[in-house]
Amino acid sequence: MSVATRLGGFRDRVGQLLKDPDELDLTSGGIGWPLFYLSLPIVVTNLLQTAYNLADTFWVGRFSTTALTAITFSFPLVFLMFAMAMGLAIAGSVLVAQNIGADDESQAQFAASQTVVFSLTVSLGLGLAGYAVVEPVLGLLGADAAVQVLAADYMRVIALGMPFMFGFAVFISLMRGYGDTVTPMLVMLGSVVLNIAIDPFLIFGWGPFPQLGITGAAIATVFSRALAMVVGLAIMFRGSYGVEIHLSQMRPDFAYWGKLLRIGVPGSVEVTGRALSVTVMLFIVGQFANEVVAGFGVVARVNSIVFLPAIAVSQGVETMTGQNVGADRLDRAERTNNFAAKILFAVLAAMGVFAFLFAESIIGVFTSDPKVIEPGATFLRYAAPSFGFIGIMRAYIGGFRGTGGTLTAAAITVVMLWVVRLPIAWFGAGSIGQEGVWAAFAVSNVVGAGLAWAWFRRGGWKRGDATDDFFGVDVGPDPEPTDD
């Protein structure tokens, strides 16, 4: 019995506990429960990704501090390569969702097939380019000689394995566009368990394996993702669950690739802009004492947990909006966005109240140093009242993406971070002190929510669907694909 078949049986049992994706009707009936069933597995998938990263950090940290430092220096280059994958994944998800909503399975299959072959082509090119520039980039980041050697060994393996890692990310998004978030969650679970299991064998040389150190961690990552991608491709080729792909539809269609780029590149800009803003903010916070920097780091980790529901619901809104736009149910798409914005505001605002009231206790979970707890708790109290506004912004950004308006989503994100947050933090740090930096988060969260809500209210989201005049993006009908 194949791995895909075994996974299918397990998926059916899990689907009975949650909600079988085939039973979800995203274009009619209620809104709350379909959105919940879409979003819950995404939350689990994101938690599994966090566990994946923690496992690597855990084992490498026990091998050597130099190796752990090397992984830290490798992260920016890995993330920049992955930013393009995120954009292509968003584009594929949107196109699949819209065609499924339009009840055009053939076009959905064509979109998925083209996304797979394009993503593999792009990832191969990026991987080879990354392999070539590893050492110069690490030198620019300031890594010392010992760290640079280890980081380069790690990055070369990751770069060569980029097609597998891209392929797995695209599989997750294509299935989500179809409305199936359970199957990707289960494949992610298997990938995480495998990575955690083989990490120590390859890093420390347990049993018959040689001691490979940080290179072993990279090999474990690539191998587990490669197997996950193979399982994902098998699932899509079989078509038993989620979207189906066909080899005959993978002949490069360069006009369609242009469409994927027009939708995907702004998504990549959005993801990259978020990541780079954290780096710049760390530079600003670095002007203060180490205890303040540590407090900032703790709150950043708290925020990453708090915002998991917002990220998951945003991706669920993206799928529901895409399918309803494809089905010409703009009224339902609008209600989905507004419903999600209200729910996320309520949930995250409640979490903000809790964080405000128990700020010291929350920071104290991560550190016992009172010199870190004090600035961390202060930062949390500045940010917590604006948590609900993050929910509003994330909900509507998911809606913009679902219509193909990824440039709108990117523009709102860039304005919030680079026009509002970072300048206020920079000038606030010089004129007020650390409180000026913390205030920048609250102000930018409110501004971001206001921008997203205002643009949505004036109907800007409707211009991101199947029209030619919205930033050059056309996600309308395509030539009939070749059948198998």
Image: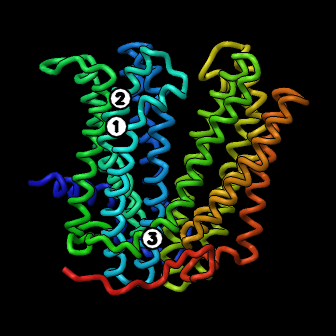
Q: Nearer the viewer, mark 2 or mark 3?
A: 3
Q: Along the line of sight, which residue is nearer the eye, 244 or 151?
A: 151
Q: Earlier in the sequence, mark 2 or mark 3?
A: 2
Q: Residues within 10 Å of mark 3 (few under 14, many from 20)?
A: few
Q: Residues within 10 Å of mark 1 (few under 14, many from 20)?
A: many
The residue where tag 1 is placed is 158
Residue at x 51% of width, y 36% of height: 76
Residue 351 tag number? none
Type of amino acid under label 2: Tyr
Q: Along the line of sight, which residue is nearer the eye, 409 or 21?
A: 409
Type of amino acid under label 1: Ile
Residue at x 69% of width, y 29% of height: 283
**Residue lying farthest left?**
1
The residue where tag 3 is placed is 258
Type of amino acid under label 3: Gly
Q: Is residue 64 left or right of residue 161?
A: right
Q: Are marks 2 and 1 in contact (CB under 8 Å)?
A: yes
The image quadrant where one finds the C terminus is bottom left
The residue where tag 2 is placed is 154
